Amino acid sequence: MWFPDHAYLIPLIAAASFVLILFFGKRMPKKGAEIGITALSICFVMALATNVQWFSHVNSAEHEAEVAQEEGEAAEALVSSESTGSATEPIEFEVEPSRASWTWWQSGDVTFSVGMLLDGPGVMMLFVVTLISLLVHIYSTDYIGGDRRYTHYFAFLSLFSASMLGLVMSETTLQLLTCWELVGLCSFALIGHWWEEKPNSDAALKAFITNRVGDVGLICGVIILFFAADQSFDIVTINEMALNGEISHLALLVASCSLMAAVMSKSGQFVLHTWLPDAMAGPTPVSALIHAATMVVAGVFMVARLYGVFFQGFSIGTSSVNPLVVIGAITVIGGASLAFVQKDIKKVLAYSTVSQLGYMVMALGVGAWTAALFHLFTHAMFKAGLFLGAGSVAHSVHSFDMTEHMGGMRKFMPKTFVTFLICTAALIGLFPLAGFWSKDEVLSGAQQLGGEGGYLVFMVVGLVGAFLTALYMTRCIYLTFFGEPKGHAADAEHPPHESGRRILVPLYILSGMAIITGFANLPNSGVLSGSPDGASLRFEHFYEPKGSYFPSVLETFDHPEFNVLIALGSTIIGLLGISLAYAWYWKGRGPHGLTSRNKFAKAGYTVLVEKYYLDHLYTGIIVGAVKGPIARGAYWFNQKGIDGVVNSAGVAAVKSGKFVYERIDQGVVDTIVNASGSAAGGSGQRLRRIQTGRVQQYAALLFAGAAILAGIFIIVI
Amino acid sequence: MDNNEFLTEWGLTLMVFLPLAGALLLMVIPKAQEQMIKVAALGAALASGAVGVAVLANFNYDSSEKLQFVVNRNWIEAIHANYIVGIDGLSVPLIALTLLITPLVMVYSWNHFPQPHNPQAFLILMLVLATGMLGTFVAQDLILFFVFFEVVLLPMYFMIGVWGGEQRQYASIKFFLYTLFGSALMIVSFLALFFVAGGDSFSMVDLAQGVADRNAAGNLAMITQVLIFGGMFMGFGIKVPMFPFHTWLPDAHTQAPTAGSVILAAVLLKLGTYGFIRVALFILPEAAVKWAPYIGALAVIGIIYGALGCLAQTDMKRLIAFSSVAHMGFVMLGIASLTTFGLNAAVFGMVAHGLITGMLFFLAGSVKDRFHTLEIKRLGGLLLQAPKLGWILGFCIMASLGLPGLAGFWGEFPAILSAYNPAPALSQELFRTYMVIAAFGTVLAAGYLLWLFQRTAFGTPSEEFADVEIEDVRVSEWIAWVPLLALILVLGVFPNIIFHVTDPFLTVMGNTFAGLK
Amino acid sequence: MDDLLLNQFLLLGAVLFCIGVYGVLARRNAVLVLMSIELILNAVNINLIAFGAFWGSITGSVFALFVIAIAAAEVGVGLAIVLLIYRNRRSVDLDDVAEMKG
């Protein structure tokens, strides 16, 4: 297995590309783009090879287990003639992840390593990240051709790819944290790519700082797990210990809750999602790569990676409600409802991303691990396709505003229109496109998994979300591609035109993926049971970790089965949403103008337009307060309070110095000195009186002195 | 004499006093020979650096917990003060930092000495400063330590007072008196310690042994130790500076010339934290346990408070100065945890802060050179006018806010980590609260630093500077900066370069605290 | 020589000393003052010789001889001074000689 064992080279190649572009990019004929594309092509090929070798690795592990089991059964059959029907049940087997490890740093007796843990989810993400990154690179050469910071752009794309690839194959939580922050940095730099305009840099700052808030949770969670797992950052160890029950439930619960904060910020879950729509200030290819397909799923990936911790911490297998699923459900509905009132096509897609990420988190919350990752996989394809399609449209009308500058675009850009339509259908979940299969699995998971009562409520939420998705996406399609051209789109002198090949080819590939990826995990149960063994549940088979560090070792962990009712129901609901929107927009039916007539409808509409007032809360109240009154108050306290004490101590010292000088020094001490001087003079005056010059007086004194001395002499001795 | 023997006997002494010799040499060079003065000063700094490199190359890193290159000579017999120098894993990184920063600062100042010019005096002060700093890091005798610790004050006082900004008089006298005030209490503590520990030696090792013996015998009152520690706390805490003794720092930094700010941030502040570990914790472990909760509290207050102070600033340099308060808070939090993790984090944090904040002050100085103002409101669009300068600023800001992969992270993260599980004698609940507060401090750090970056580097230049030609990074700046930038990156990627050196000594210390109940 | 005899000598010395002191303090004539000083010195001499005899030592007698010699020299110098004073002032009254007054 050369490729999986050396997969760490893939992020290193991308990192090398970053360095090369940074130092030599400007001197290259294509300004560095060729370096990035070459590097990413190599990465993609290596990722493909890694996938292929990984498949054979999984298959051979399964084969070995089969052989072992058959031998066991043969031995058993000798003993008892009764044959059990176990041959039809899935075989339990373990798949060794590919690992590599180097010492990073040490403290005390603990050594910290940096390395690679590559198993199913990592291999899958390798494919997704390298594919979309490569497509985005190619797309960008046209889309932002001639940009003022073309080279920087490609440098950061490379750095992003490197950090994201590093993140998905992190061996330790600390490494995960590192890559997590680095992708955040790239996101910051790319959102703020056109930083000359203040809104762009504001959006970049907002993204970075919101993510930092989540990072507090990540840091705390990583630290708690580190100490809970006997001072280890190792993901496998942490998961194993969590699943063995070696870590207390309380520690797991607290760690999971802390990590939730990180998921909420990075994966745009309510209430920390507000940065994601603003992040659309960046170039569209960046939105497709970072803010739809890869970076924002890092939170989902992190939960999937540490699933043992979350599974035990939130008792996912036995409960019927937990923070993950609740946050996910709120996000599904909240994101979808906000997508409905946007005028900017990218913002519609951004809120749609928020909503879809909610599905993934919800799936993880109900215990449908594979469903979540599968949805991640398909979503990455069609959402990247949608973003790039939106970019293609915007590229020709020079605006993202659907209501002002678009409309009727299908006539001008038929190819873009078709790809956009396919991706939209996949997003809505129409049979047999990708979204249908993955969303269906999420819903089945909510229906079937969990403890008593299960997560049925959340299946309903999922269905409502599907309905809303159908509505807002149909609206988006109508406003963009149907109706009358408006604004720039109606400009007769420069009519919109179809985009070039470098934009269209990525669109074709992604819409193709949106069609086929759904079959990657064809169910093998319910009405679809009896699908050929080598064709069904391939995603689960290859990408779900099999080993002691994954909750599948627990009895409470299960896979949902295909439910034809849910499949039919969600399709019907999707079609219902489409036809409702069709009736509203194309036929003009329904209570148009309700929002201006009805007080409640108007209030609801305002709440949505104001994005539930969350931005007001964050920017206006929290940030405003910290930056304004609180910071100024602290500084005032610093200057007047603490520094006041220091300064007044200084002033007091000077004053007391003056006092000492004037009163004590000049007044008292000097007086003493002067007095002693005059005293000496005075006593001299007095003493000189005995200097009479009379010899006999002297003699008298002499004798008197002698007599006194003699007296003392006699008395003492 | 064998080469190695010579190095062992004279290496440290030469390293410490070569700059001083250089300063004496500078005095006799006529003032008009400016070029010669500069070359001589740089030569002295480099010579000291060369000796230092030789010493560090011969340092035995496998047993870095032991004192090496020890020289013990009689000095002032009347008061039992000896000339004892030696280095171990704790001092090595800081010595390396000092040896690096001094010549870089000289190179940076090469062609634009601040007003009133006079490179001769300026460089003499710088060299004396170098001797003081290096001496503090090698001294193993309290009186010697104290002398070097105080030697540093005077040159810095003159540097701020003569070459400083408009309020230089106020700032320099504040800096001088404030630190001297702490030193006064510190020397009292040193003397008390001397008598408590037996009264026949000022050697740190002997004092620690004496205190430990008396503790073991149980005839040393805890209150005595706590009070002695208190005196040291004032001395070192003011130097660090810890909240609420930090107010001299923003003034001193803002008024000091660039070179002074850089040295102040990069090395001088570390004298305080180094002293905490080397003297206070080492000699009085039991008292340290009593003090740790309060130090931890002041540290996290400093983190949040420094960040809030930054948010209120309108002057770039003052903002960076305030950020030092926050960053040193992380260092002190690591120290207060009294664990190997925390102490390692603290030492790494010292070096990282030295490199990063030193770099930020360099940048602030260069911005001031070009725009003649540091008023954030008037700046903007730096990335357009001087893209390289702008990107370097961005890099340093990212490093300063603790981005993993750059040096700042390794001072911050292990410090937060250590607070989760402090030494067994300390309250876990309390320190976990500190941990969460400190973690929130990282959000504020991102806030004020990015906000600074947005308003200075992003956007377009303000009207006032729109047509002014702004020079991008100069050659002398490149020479001074590239080593720092490279180190920030290298230490961020390979943190073990420092952890490997400091760990053995700090493990011994951490185990001492782990044994205390 | 026994205690009694010693006492008598000492008594004599004391009487002579007192007469001498009286003379020094009370007389105004410089010559008489000089003579009184001689008396004091001789009182000391008697004491010295008496103690010397009492202890059977000649030290006292030797001392007395020294004192006599010095007294002779002193009288010589003293009389010379008195003579000079007389030549200058035509008087040997000590009250007139107060040049040393401070």
Image (tube, helix red, strand yellow):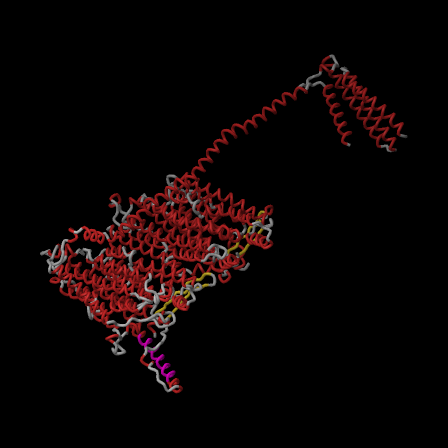
- Residue A366 is drawn in which quadrant? bottom left
| Residue A71 lies in the magenta-colored region | yes
Where is A148 relative to B257, above or below? below
Instruction: Please provide percent x and percent y for residue B2.
Output: 54, 60
Q: Residue A546, relative to residue A710: is it above or below?
A: below
Residue A525 vs residue A208, the one in the foreground: A525
Q: Is residue B146 above or below residue B93?
A: above
Closest to the observer, A608 or A274: A608
Image quarter in which the N terminus of chain B is found: bottom right
Asked if residue A434 lies left or right of residue A247, the reply is: left
Q: Quadrant of residue A54?
A: bottom left
Residue occupying the far right of the picture:
C1
Magenta-drawn stretch contains C74: no
Residue B40 seen anywhere in this rendered image of the structure? no
Query: Which range of residues does the magenta coloring cover?
Result: A55-73
Q: Main secondary structure of the magenta part?
A: helix
Does residue A703 appear in this view?
yes
Give the residue drawn at x 44%, y 59%. Answer: B499
